[in-house]
Image: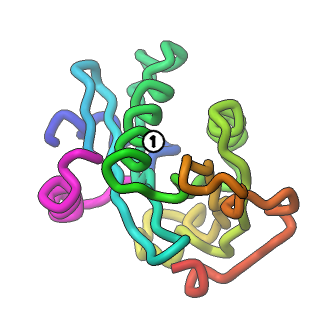
Amino acid sequence: MFKFNHINLDLWTETYGINFYLQYLSRWPDLCSVEESPNGLLGKAEGQDTEWHGHITALTVAPEYRRLSLARKMIDYLERVSDKNYRGFFVDLYVRCTNDVAIGMYEGLGYSVYRRVREYYESLGLGRNLRDEEDAFDMRKPLTRDPMLRSVRPNGREISVSAHDAS
């Protein structure tokens, strides 16, 4: 956990306090993955009924290790665990609407925008800077329990909800 310190300074990575990470590690140990190089993945399982899913809480790769497919490897792992161990319907994540690089990467991995969440980062109470007023895209990728692709919307970028309604 303490190896994340220099990654936590990355402009695009949302970070939390150590208590947050320890709660995830104790509750969903199989959805927390750290590679030996400076990067990591943190996830959880949540939701009810057909909304039961895996969630990518934090994914980061240190700048000097980017473009080596490490993010793909970690996401593949979380998707497998969400599918086989937790039997989720989909995996989702939130990404800043302005983070075109990450959005393109996630789309290349099979994720699509399900909806736009207004002022998502402000609702987290991170209070780091003015960027916290930004919206987020809720991006989803269906798993084997969703053969009808109900977790996918072709017009997801046009559907907007408040951060309160997204939880």
Q: Is residue 24 magenta?
A: yes
Q: 161 or 134, which is in the foreground? A: 161
Residue sitting at 23 percent across and 63 percent down? Answer: 20
- Splitting the image into 4 quarters, where does residue 30 fall? top left
Task: Say which of 19 and 122 sits in front.
Answer: 19
Q: Where is residue 86 in the image (x, y as percent from the top left)?
A: 35, 55
Mark 1 surroundings: few (<14), some (14-19) or many (≥20) residues within 10 A: many
**Tag 1's secondary structure?**
helix
Residue 7 percent location from the top left of the image: 34, 36
User: Residue lying furthest top in this view?
Assistant: 68
- Above or below, 134 relative to 94: below
Q: Left or right? Give the position of 79 relative to 15.
A: right
* Left or right of 95 on screen, residue 60: left
Q: In this view, does 150 lie above or below 60?
A: below
Furthest toward the bottom, the residue is 164
Q: Work out whether residue 140 or residue 104 is closer to the camera in this orientation and state it.
A: 140
**Residue assigned mark 1:** 79
Tell me which segment is drawn in magenta. 14-31
Quarter-of-image position of residue 153: bottom right
- Residue ID at (70%, 38%): 107
**Image location of residue 75, percent across then percent down:** 46, 36
Answer whether residue 125 is magenta in the image.
Answer: no
